[in-house]
Image: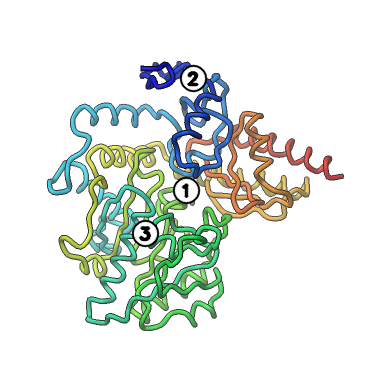
């Protein structure tokens, strides 16, 4: 076996997994991987709390958290313990069989979505289905909506309404609902019978929804689309139209859900309850797990054999997800999201106003963005050299999706770096 083909072996948390250099690692990826990612020039090897470390030991403050996945930061001791214990017992078992954790996790999520025990005592009764990812949760949601539309024998009730500028995933159903040509181009034809309306345009919404609509699908807050919120009035009209036309109202909370807005579900921040909600990113603290949670009237439309998954809802992921939800509650992390999120927004607005570098700050909690007057990617690139990880989206937006553990002192550091880099850009442009 040649030296270049040696597989890196396990290492302690404090040491690199191999002696390979950045150049060697990047070259191997260029040689063997599909070139689908425009990666940053850094190899990350470990993390702790709100910090990541690269192959040379350099420390980075993480405002990205794996695009919203690592809500508990990195190497949370309770998550590490749960993974170790469960991996030694049972990692995977087919959904042909029961295991200990899928039922309790479904019960917990349905209770949180229903506002009580999930059994209709004080709120709606929900049921859950577990997938591997967010895009699969969207696929399952629209399958369920179409099944419910066809349940009364109405084959024409199959039309979908989605929003311009939205992003729902890379699989064909989710891509068909994504209102951005840059993601759709080259993959046509996609699903037919999808109508796009402008976010917060109530009149266009009313014109699009009719008795043949089986679902209205939206993100309460656009994530990849630039951190734009749906207005409460628009969401209320979505709810009213879905009720009037017996369609499903589907919320995609894959990025904005599970605490990031300052409530466990984003819909609770807006006061409008969907019929189906899709979740994923932070659910299993970094392990692949998604879900869609549906009101009973829609959940009853599906029968055994009409949907399924090999990996979704396995014992390892479900046990870790239960631990994630327990940590969020017991460590009062939602309270921290609200408190530090308000501070982050205050500091971003002050930066935009005083420096004149941004013209708008959007979002809430730990899903926020600042709209710049210059391209965002060079700012993100320069921040990497300063030891801070930001994210850019929609060309001119710096997006913030930090771990729920973030404190004001971390915000201060991030703002200092952003202020410095924007100041350099302004001087260069003068």
Residue at screen point 32% across, 79% down: 157
Residue at screen point 56% across, 45% down: 341
Q: Quadrant of residue 117?
A: bottom left
Residue at screen point 57% across, 55% down: 227
In which quadrant will I find the N terminus? top left
Residue 355 relative to residue 192: left or right: right
Q: Which mark is residue 234?
A: none
To which residue does mark 1 refer? 260
User: How dense is the environment of label 1, judged by Cα within 10 Å: few (below 14), some, or many (20 and up)?
Assistant: many
Residue 220's place in the image compared with 370, above or below, is: below
Residue 184's place in the image compared with 245, above or below, is: above
Spot occupied by residue 94 in the image (x, y as percentages of width and height): 17, 44
Mark 3–mark 1 CB contact (< 8 Å): no
To which residue does mark 2 refer? 20
Callout count = 3
Q: Residue furthest left?
A: 97
User: How dense is the environment of label 3, judged by Cα within 10 Å: few (below 14), some, or many (20 and up)?
Assistant: many
To which residue does mark 3 refer? 138
Mark 3: which secondary structure?
helix
Spot occupied by residue 32 in the image (x, y as percentages of width and height): 44, 35
In which quadrant will I find the C terminus? top right
Which of the two marks, 3 or 2, is nearer to us in this view? 2
Q: CA distance from mark 3 to mark 1?
A: 19 Å
Q: CA distance from mark 3 to mark 2?
A: 39 Å
Q: CA distance from mark 1 to mark 2?
A: 36 Å
Residue closest to the eye, 323 or 164? 164
């Amino acid at each position: 076996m040649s030296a270049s083909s040696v597989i890196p072996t396990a290492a302690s948390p404090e040491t690199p997994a191999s002696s390979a250099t950045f150049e060697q690692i990047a070259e191997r990826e260029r040689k063997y991987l599909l070139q689908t990612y425009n990666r940053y020039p850094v190899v990350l090897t470990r993390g702790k709390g709100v910090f990541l470390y690269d192959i040379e030991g350099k420390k980075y403050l993480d405002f990205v958290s794996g695009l919203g996945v690592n809500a508990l930061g990195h190497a949370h001791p309770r998550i590490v313990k749960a993974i170790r214990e469960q991996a030694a017992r049972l990692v995977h078992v087919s959904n042909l069989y029961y295991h200990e954790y899928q039922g309790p996790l479904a019960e917990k999520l349905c209770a949180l979505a229903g506002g009580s025990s999930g059994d209709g005592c004080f709120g709606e009764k929900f049921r859950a289905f577990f997938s591997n990812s967010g895009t699969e949760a969207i696929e399952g949601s629209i399958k369920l909506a179409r099944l419910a539309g066809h349940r009364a024998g109405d084959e024409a009730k199959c039309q979908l309404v989605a929003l311009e500028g939205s992003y729902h995933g890379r699989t064909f159903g989710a891509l068909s609902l994504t209102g951005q040509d840059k993601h759709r181009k080259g993959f046509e034809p996609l699903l037919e019978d999808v109508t796009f309306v402008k976010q917060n345009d109530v009149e266009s919404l009313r014109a699009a929804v009719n008795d043949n609509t089986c679902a209205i699908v939206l993100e309460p807050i656009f994530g990849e689309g630039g951190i734009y919120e749906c207005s409460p009035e628009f969401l209320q009209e979505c709810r009213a139209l879905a009720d009037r036309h017996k369609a499903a109202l589907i919320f995609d909370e894959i990025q904005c859900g599970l605490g990031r807005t300052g409530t466990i579900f984003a819909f609770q921040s807006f006061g409008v309850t969907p019929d189906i909600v899709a979740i994923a990113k932070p659910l299993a603290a970094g392990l692949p797990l998604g879900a869609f949670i549906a009101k009973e009237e829609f959940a009853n439309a599906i029968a055994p054999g009409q949907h399924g998954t090999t990996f979704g809802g396995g014992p390892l992921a479900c046990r870790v997800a239960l631990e994630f939800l327990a940590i969020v509650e017991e460590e009062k992390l939602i309270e921290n999201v609200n408190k530090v999120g308000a501070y982050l927004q205050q500091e971003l607005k002050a930066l935009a106003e005083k420096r004149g570098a941004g013209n708008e700050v959007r979002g809430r909690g730990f899903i926020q963005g600042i709209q710049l007057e210059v391209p965002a990617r060079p700012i993100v690139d320069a921040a990497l050299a300063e030891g801070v990880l930001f994210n850019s989206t929609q060309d001119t937006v710096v997006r913030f999706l930090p771990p729920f553990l973030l404190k004001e002192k971390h915000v201060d550091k991030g703002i200092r770096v952003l202020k410095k880099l924007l100041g350099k850009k302004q001087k260069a442009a003068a």
